Image (cartoon, rainbow, N blue to C red):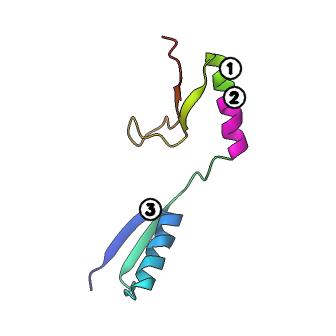
Amino acid sequence: GRVVLFTGLGCTIAALYIALDHQNIDTSNLYTIELICHGVTPKIVAEQYIDYLEMKYKSKIKKFTVRSKIKGWKPIYIFAEFETTLF
């Protein structure tokens, strides 16, 4: 009977509605706000950027993400960890 406001990415909101539907939970008091998603980075773009970084820093990358939260939820999102340290 409570009014609920849920915010999230479109895929998260869709998953919420599916889960609530499977449990036969009434969603008439559920309001949702979708955040704009930047989408998935195309695999070829990530591979080309990794190749570029490995050539630039002369080291193989062992960890790479375009959704890093190391410094919180603000840009810069890209994180690369190399096998060898240059510094």
Location of the N terminus (image quadrant): bottom left
Q: Are marks 3 and 2 in contact (CB under 8 Å)?
A: no
Q: Nearer the viewer, residue 49 or 29?
A: 49
Farthest-out residue, top: 87
Examine the rendered structure and indicate whether residue 44 appears above or below residue 51.
below
Q: Are marks 3 and 1 in contact (CB under 8 Å)?
A: no
Classify residue 16 as left or right of residue 38. Answer: left
Mark 3 vs mark 1: in front? 1
Residue at image point 48% right, 71% down: 15
Q: Are marks 2 and 1 in contact (CB under 8 Å)?
A: yes
Question: Magenta span covers which residues?
Answer: 43-51
Q: CA distance from mark 2 to mark 1?
A: 6 Å
Q: Nearer the viewer, residue 3 or 49?
A: 49
* SS type, badge 1: helix
Q: Nearer the viewer, residue 14 or 22?
A: 22
Residue at image point 38% right, 68% down: 6
Examine the rendered structure and indicate whether residue 49 appears above or below residue 20.
above
* SS type, badge 2: helix
Q: Which label sits on residue 82?
A: none
Q: Earlier in the sequence, mark 3 or mark 2?
A: 3
Name the residue tied to disc 2: 51
Q: Amino acid at mark 3?
A: Gly
Residue at image point 37% right, 87% down: 26
Examine the rendered structure and indicate whether residue 70 appears above or below residue 24.
above
Q: CA distance from mark 3 to mark 2?
A: 33 Å
Give residue 86's position: percent from left, percent from top: 52, 12
Name the residue tied to disc 1: 55
Mark 2 Cα within 10 Å, few/some/many (few <14, many 20+)? some
Q: Amino acid at mark 1?
A: Met
Name the residue tied to disc 3: 8
Give residue 62's position: percent from left, percent from top: 55, 31
